[in-house]
Image: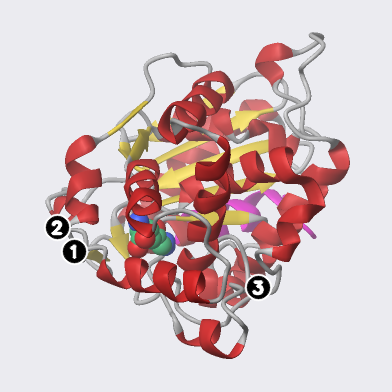
Amino acid sequence: MAHPSLSEIPHLLQRISEEARAHFGEGKVANYIPALANVKPNQFGMAIACVDGSTHTVGDAHVPFSLQSITKLFTFVLALRAEGDALWQRVGREPSGAAFNSIVQLETENGIPRNPFINAGALVITDILTSRYVQLDYALLGALRRLADDPELHWNPEVARSEREHADRNMAMAYFMKSHGNFHNDPALVLDNYCAQCATEMTCAQLAQASMFLANDGRDLTLQGQPDEHFLTADQTRRVNALLLTCGAYDAAGDFAYRISLPVKTGVGGGIVAVIPEVGTVAVWSPELDAKGNSVLGAFALERLVQLTGWGYS
Ligand code: DON
């Protein structure tokens, strides 16, 4: 299939948005974090940031939403930059085939989580970063502000507090891993950091921009030509994208690969970010989730996008 020219993208986005909106009502807004249950369900936004520097948006693409697990992508990248391959002594890189918040594999696998994107794996990553940064929230926000080129990015304290008050399962996983020696800090402190991290808010336009290095061999476009333009090496970037393709949608990763064939990261706030290597990044947001915690309209919109453009592994 011939790929579309960039001038066709606004029309494409309009079409996908209209088709997607017919699916309102098919999912449910996350409610296990009470502050997220108040989000209005009938919202849909989509943004495509292209490596040529252009950004195209439709619908609610400028409304901030809670990134939740999408932050696991960025914390993983920070840990990879800091630790390199030593990271793999603490966390695996296989799909789990289990729910994002499942605890069961930890028992038979010596407290080593399957991958950095399930909750257990992301908690280990936050533990690693907690050992490294006195104020992890500032370290993370600093990186995100740089990548999104927006000094105002923040996390929402009300959402963080709401999750922290209902974090018993994540806390249980942290203690379980600690009993195996795979958790080095006080679980309560790591959970504070983790809940703040998950409560980071961005719009689709910002998220697409912040993820752009993944479509651009690790280069941060906003620093093009400067000595530190590489946020990751090209080799690291390829590896991160491989993990996103195989593990980014939890126990729906196979289904996502079949339908969308792009590296993705999803979050229970209803966001999904997808990487189209060499082309750009797509961020889509709609709060209603399917049974596995992934955005119904978000997955639909990405599936239509690859069908209509031929982007991806076709
Ligand atoms: O730890 C949690 O359960 C949430 N803060 C994040 C989970 C999440 O976003 C899963 N994604 N689909």
For residue 23, say whether it is visible: no
Magenta-colored stretch includes residue 306 = yes
Mark 3 element type:
helix
> Residue 309: which disc?
none
For the residues marked 1 and 2, what is the alpha-carbon distance in whole angstroms? 5 Å
Mark 1 element type:
loop
Question: Residue 27: which quarter of the image?
Answer: bottom left
Q: Residue furthest right?
A: 235
> Residue 31: which disc?
1
For the residues marked 1 and 3, what is the alpha-carbon distance in whole angstroms? 28 Å
Q: Amino acid at mark 2?
A: Pro
Q: Say which of marks 1 and 3 sits in front.
A: 1
Q: Is residue 168 left or right of residue 87?
A: left
Q: Is residue 293 left or right of residue 98?
A: left
The one nearer the camera, 73 or 176, is: 176
Residue linked to disc 3: 258
